[in-house]
Image (cartoon, helix red, strand yellow):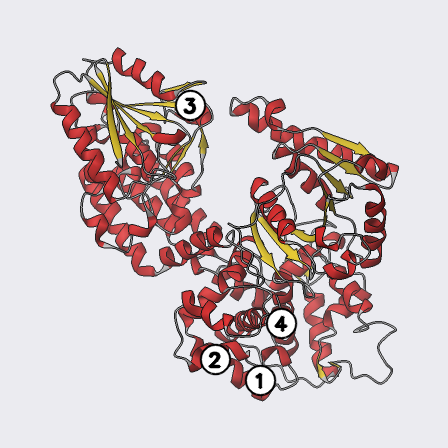
Amino acid sequence: MAATRSLSHTVAVITINYPPVNALSSPVRHALIKEFGEATKDPSVKAIVLAGANGKFSAGADIREFSTSALKTISLEDMNETIEASRKPVVAAIEGVALGGGLELALACHYRVANVQSRVGLPEVLIGILPAAGGTQRLPRLIGVPAALDVIIRGRHVPATEALQLGIVDEVVQGNAVNAAILLARKVIGSNLDKRRLSTNYVPSNPNMESFLDTAVEKAKKQFRGAQAPIACIEAVRASVQKPYKHGIEKERQLFTSLWATGQPQAQQYAFFSERNVAKWTHPSGGRWDTVTPKPVRTAAVIGLGTMGRGIATSLAKANIPVIALEQDAQQLEIGKKAVKGLLEREAEKLLKQGLAPGTVLAPVHFTLHFAELHDVDLVIEAVYENTELKKEIFRKLKSVCKPDAFLCTNTSGLNIDEIAAVTNHPDLVIGTHFFSPANIMRLLEVVRGQQTSLTTIATAMTLGKTLGKVSVLVGNCPLFVGNRLLGPYVDQANYLIEEGCYPEDVDKVLEDFGITMGPFRMMDLAGLDVGWRARTEKGLTGNKVPQGTPARQRLGNRYSPLPDMLCELGRFGQKTGKGWYLYDKPGGRIAHPDPWVKDVLHKYRNTHQIKQRPASPEVILERCVYALINEGFRVLEDGIASGPEDIDVIYNNGYGWPKYRGGIMYYASTVGLGKVLDVLEKYHKEHPDVPSMKPAFLLKKLVAVGEPPIKEWRTQVGNLVHKL
């Protein structure tokens, strides 16, 4: 049964039972209406409690029904109206989560009791829609417009203690919320429920409300460049202020329909399900996520307490895994120790605000200079400077001090996992874990398997990522892995565009208006231009290793832009030095200003190399940069480095600032049309045969040749190629 009813003296307890998260699917809605109707008619029932089985109230609507006819039966709002209209008091007993439609259901109840560890929220904006079962109308009536907008636009999961302060729930309890809800239900039997029916209340307002909402729209346009759902949410809340509830609900539905027509909800829901699907990894040998048992990680060590190591140590402690943090330099150990303690103190403050004891959630971090102290840890994450020889030296030490079955992870953004694993006694226990900075905040984790990495090691690393709250994507071992590998052709095109007549701010504006968080030149300034410069120097692309007589704009017969090298030779490393592609107010400054010096250098550079200035249109800038990403994405699939387009999309959505409302790089290619992408690439490569990264990928041509199948069928075509993963 999707919902069951029991009787506790005079209180009927209706329990949603629809594993795993009690989604309010069509069977649940029908069952709730049935059970609620019978409880309403039963003269022995004086009050009703709504609860969820297995410690979860409800995680909301069933997303899979949005594009089906199931929502046209009993809608969530029909059900909510029925519950709210009840003459018998209805109390929601919230345990676990009440999210989306789950919170809308709770708001239709007359009272709400929550367990202290539960969370509530209306996160629909995160999948491209708005709360469409009265959430945008009832919540402002309950807690006011400013607080409601904050919850709705950000899609926040609000801890129970904060929900109590805001007025979303009436009571927070340490123990069983159902028992507490039954007690409250008995107390309010016979009480007047008029003011408890939120749809009949007015929204708390003030004379400046319209101005406040207009400002909210402008802020949302800047913050969520191009995303329509946040704007629609504000307009729905505006309707709650301006219109009676019934008309507000009509506006809510109209906005939902218009959002669906933009294609953004479909893209964001693809992104949502892709994040779930990447956890279901497969291996060419036949191993799968559901057939391989991970080993438990009870203790861990982090080597290196730079920015990345500090974030990783903090993430482990937040996951309640005791950590040994090792530095090889006493001064660096003290600096790192102070930084980690500061991060953990902030985490402890958050937990206290949620009514939780930090000591029961945050594991201890022990700091040391001695490798010998790592003798009994289950897993080590090395997070030192990006240098293969240094990492190999550390792994040689680890093989002599760690227990034989300890997992050894290297945090690298693109070095050869197999080369590092080769210096150990157990290369099958070595795996890459590419965290993104700051590691205690960024959600993405690229898990990189080497040639000899065992299935158990893969399963353990992927499970650890989930424990740390990361979106973990399994990728193959190649230079720069997936995310950074795709950046190469993208940045090359950006550099070529400014050689040909654009300026950094032109290119960045087009890509940021498209929705990418940060354009390539601002991104390079943030990361530090010296990072790429050092890598190019080691490869012999710049500096003393370049053979005499090599043309400035060519390497190995292919086009090359020396512009980033020229900036670095002058000490312009980006934000850290206050100068890079942009000018900053001071070293470490964040606000980028177009630099007249850069424009002058570009003008002289073009004259020196006799390049005719031809500024590109916004359309051409977008196509050249984004199609370069897409083409390399197809190559990654060809090479078997990623097992499907979803892997690439999840990586770029969560680690590289791609707008989720566009689904992902590969999803975007499918919406533009693979034929169009192929035509643009073929034309460009014909004109520029010295740019091999723009030669159309074989897989792209194959997909066009077989009629451009939908993205969900690309894996079949990928599977027909020879995998290198």
Toward the top, the furthest residue is 187
Disc 4 and disc 3: Cα gap in Å? 51 Å
- Which residue position holds label 1? 685
Q: CA distance from mark 1 to mark 2?
A: 18 Å
Sequence-first tag of 1 and 2: 1
Badge 2: few (under 14), some or many (20 or more) residues near its Cα, within 10 Å? Answer: few
Comes first in the chain, label 3 or label 2: 3
State the residue in front, 563 or 178.
Answer: 178
Residue plotted at (61% across, 73% down):
493
Q: Is residue 280 left or right of residue 497?
A: left
Residue identified by numbered label 2? 702
Query: What kind of residue is marked 3?
Result: Asn
In the rendered structure, the answer to whether residue 248 lies left or right of residue 364 reads left
- Residue at (57% x, 60% y) in the render: 283
Check disc 1: other Cα within 10 Å, few if <14, some if 14-19, many if 20+.
some
Query: Tags 4 and 2 in contact by the CB under 8 Å rule?
Result: no
Q: Tags 3 and 2 in contact by the CB under 8 Å rule?
A: no
Residue 73 locus on image (x, y percent): 18, 47
State which mark lies toward you, 1 or 2.
2
Q: Position of residue 347 (x, y in %)?
A: 61, 31
Q: Report, in whole angstroms, how far the alpha carbon at label 1 lies from the one at label 4.
A: 13 Å
517, 721: nearer the viewer: 721
Q: CA distance from mark 3 to mark 1?
A: 61 Å
Which residue position is annotated with label 3? 115
Where the N terminus falls, by quadrant? top left
